[in-house]
Amino acid sequence: MKKVAILGAGTMGKGIAIDFSTGGYDVNLFDSFEAARENALPAIERDLGVMAEMGVFPEEKAKESLKNITIYDNMIEAAKDADFVIEVVPEILELKQDIFAELDKNCKPDAIFASNTSSLKLGDMMAKLSDERKKRTLICHYYNPAHLLPIVELSCYGNMPEDIFWQVYDMYEAIGKKPVKVDKDVPGMVANRIQCAIYREVYSLMENEVAAPDQIEKAMMYGMCFRYATTGQREITDMGGIDVWSKVADNIWPTLESRTTSCPYMTDRVAAGEYGFKSGKGFYSYESEEEKKEIIANFQKRLMIQLVASKKYVDHKK
Ligand SMILES: NC(=O)c1ccc[n+]([C@@H]2O[C@H](COP(=O)([O-])OP(=O)(O)OC[C@H]3O[C@@H](n4cnc5c(N)ncnc54)[C@H](O)[C@@H]3O)[C@@H](O)[C@H]2O)c1
């Protein structure tokens, strides 16, 4: 695969464009809105510049990568010669179905289609595709910011022959991502399910005032998250003793939060219009757009430091 078309140059699309362009791919980036098209390259150039500044790659690579990206105002022109086409448009089923149908008629027969959906079902999104194209379509779910979080979850739900799946998997590994093969179609794939379990308990601990919110977050960041960044659950349990972890589960699991709808800690704030960044107040208050930009920039710089540090990790193949 040589040429990648990315449809949608919003939050995620721009990050995915950085991933593929730094991986040496020709990237055709399409957006149906002029403002998004105009904003895309300057924003990507800024991000690439900061990545170089932070030591993720040399400055020369940032410059070269930018040259790999071409902006398109016509979807078919952007996608017709591509080997891999990923849609990153808003989470609207009909929109994604129609885009895939249009692509099917106009793209190369062997082009692979992908969706970055967070919540839609692959089967539903493929409803208007030919049977042949269904064999070449999958979900490639990124985490935000896509250019800094190594994970991309890939659906392997049986519609796609395994050799095509592994072609996609290998492509992601080659550009430095850490692809996760997901074998069953469950809501949230894998990473979001784990994250949901964590924040259900986190907000429950806060609601029940077991510790102050900042102390609970400290426990996450400097306890289990610090360790999980370097290895997985099974090795940690082996080192601690499966017998011990099993006993701990017996003692603590019955007391864990198990609610099946969102919690008052969130819903009360939603009812008060406190959404976070977008309303200027959430768990914290935000005075200005400048302040929010600075918070995001600092967050991304911390992720870049982690990205550089993680290059020194030994890959766990267990
Ligand atoms: N934001 C996240 O944290 C996140 C994480 C993982 C997955 N996703 C998924 O990624 C997809 C995109 O999310 P986002 O956050 O980047 O949204 P976004 O609103 O930032 O970007 C969507 C872009 O698509 C463009 N667009 C709209 N209609 C289009 C069309 N017909 N053709 C081409 N472009 C079109 C918009 O102009 C916009 O630039 C969604 O499916 C979302 O669920 C988002």
Image (spheres, helix red, strand yellow):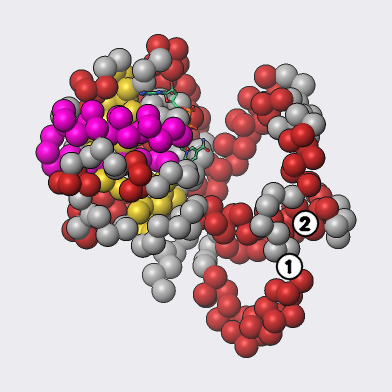
> For the N terminus, which image quadrant?
top left
Q: Nearer the viewer, residue 165 or 45?
A: 165
Q: Amino acid at mark 1?
A: Leu
Q: Nearer the viewer, residue 274 or 262?
A: 262
Q: Is residue 202 left or right of residue 310?
A: right
Q: Position of residue 28 (x, y in %)?
A: 27, 26
Q: Amino acid at mark 2?
A: Ser
Image-quarter location of ligand 1: top left
Q: Are marks 1 and 2 in contact (CB under 8 Å)?
A: yes
Q: Position of residue 98 (x, y in %)?
A: 30, 30
Determine the residue positioned at 36% across, 20% down. 31
Q: Which residues are magenta?
A: 91-117
Q: Label 1: few (<14), some or many (≥20) within 10 Å?
A: few
> In which quadrant of the rendered view does residue 71 lie?
top left
Q: Label 2: few (<14), some or many (≥20) within 10 Å?
A: some
Between discs 1 and 2, the one toward the N terminus: 2
SS class of the residue under badge 1? loop
Determine the residue positioned at 39% across, 61% down. 184
**Where is mark 2, residue-wise?**
204
**Where is mark 1, residue-wise?**
256
Determine the residue positioned at 48% across, 29% down. 11
Determine the residue positioned at 60% across, 41% down. 302
Q: Hey, which residue is sitting farthest bottom in the picture?
A: 243
